[in-house]
Amino acid sequence: EWYGDTTIKQSSYQYFYAKGRKYLVLNVQYQGDATVLAWAQDVIDDNPDLPTIVNTHCYFAPDGSYEPYANTIWNTLINDNSQVFMVLCGHHDSQGPKYNSRENAAGEIVHELMTDYQQTDYGGGYLRLLEFDEENSVIHASAYSPYYDLYHDTYPYDTFDMALNFNA
């Protein structure tokens, strides 16, 4: 009930709950083609009222600009679906985590985060933690390693907050 995928098993979706609110996470495979993006749109269409996070492998370039596929996925899937409020990605690790926000077609903010710690002791077990703080209308982002039991604090976007109106 909480999981679904494509027939080739390279893209999937999951549901999770935070503070009693149900969310949708769409995992879109690396440079998924039009068929994959159509599948993702169908999942969104089947869940029209769920706040949605899109997770894809490569979105930001090393310099912080967008990879060509980021423009494809933005124009095809994210921009016109106002329920998408966040994009998560990895892939490039040379300059630490990245963050950007931009408006979608409905004028709502989409938060975009790149997290990749491969250059930190082969990853060091670092994970991106997102704490949904509805009381204060913010998502707290941090990077934590359960292996070292440490928070990472070297880069500007290791730890930061993103404003979010959870009721919108």
Image (tube, rainbow, N blue to C red):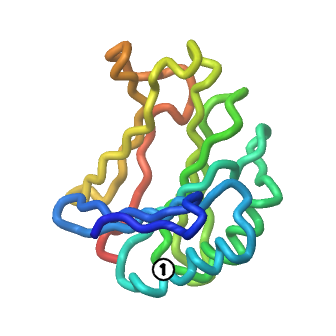
**Residue 34 location (% of width, % of height):** 73, 76
Q: Image check: 124 left or right of 29? A: left
Q: Residue at x 30, y 65 (%)?
A: 2
**Residue 81 location (% of width, % of height):** 55, 80
Quadrant of image for the N terminus: bottom left
**Residue 72 location (% of width, % of height):** 76, 69
Name the residue furthest right: 68
Quadrant position of residue 28: bottom right
- Viewer-closest of 124 and 136: 124
Count residues near mark 1 (Cα–Cα under 10 Å), then give few for <14, some for 14-19, many for 20+: many
31 in relation to 39, above or below = above
Residue labelled with disc 1: 44
Q: Secondary structure at mark 1?
A: helix
Q: Residue at x 56, y 48 (%)?
A: 113
Name the residue furthest left: 20
50 in relation to 88, above or below = below
54 in relation to 48, above or below = above
- Viewer-closest of 146 and 35: 35
Q: Residue at x 79, y 39 (%)?
A: 63
